[in-house]
Amino acid sequence: MDATRTGNTLTYKNYSGTIEYSEPDGVYHGRVIGIRASLFYEGDTIEALTADFRDAVDEYLELCEERGVEPQRAQ
């Protein structure tokens, strides 16, 4: 499963995240929206940002599984 981009939003495994650009830093960054957990990601390109978004979601889901807790879902 790959992340999809629609406008300024990324979607992966039913999680959505923002796409923002910091001109002074020259990087894209974002955060997963709709959940209480703070998941952030960044990249020098949209492709790198997308990959880091996928990694953030996958790592979050793995951590939840390791801890035996139900992952938060967008409300």
Image (cartoon, rainbow, N blue to C red):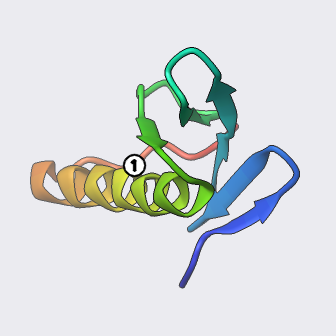
Mark 1 element type: loop
Q: Quadrant of the C terminus?
A: top right
Give the residue drawn at x 25%, y 47%. 69
Residue 73 appears at what percent x and percent y?
Answer: 56, 46
Q: Quadrant of the N terminus?
A: bottom right
Give the residue drawn at x 43%, y 39%. 41
Residue 40 lies in what quarter of the image? top left
- Callout 1 amino acid: Pro
Total marks drawn? 1
| Tag 1 residue | 71
Asked whether, in this view, residue 46 is left or right of residue 60, the answer is right
Give the residue drawn at x 45%, y 62%. 54
Residue 28 appears at what percent x and percent y?
Answer: 57, 37
64 w.r.t. 74: above or below? below
* Number of other residues with Cα within 10 Å of mark 1, as a class: few under 14, some 14 to 19, many 20 or more: some
In front: 48, or 34? 48
Q: Residue furthest top?
A: 24
Residue 18 appears at what percent x and percent y?
Answer: 68, 37
Give the residue drawn at x 59%, y 65%. 12
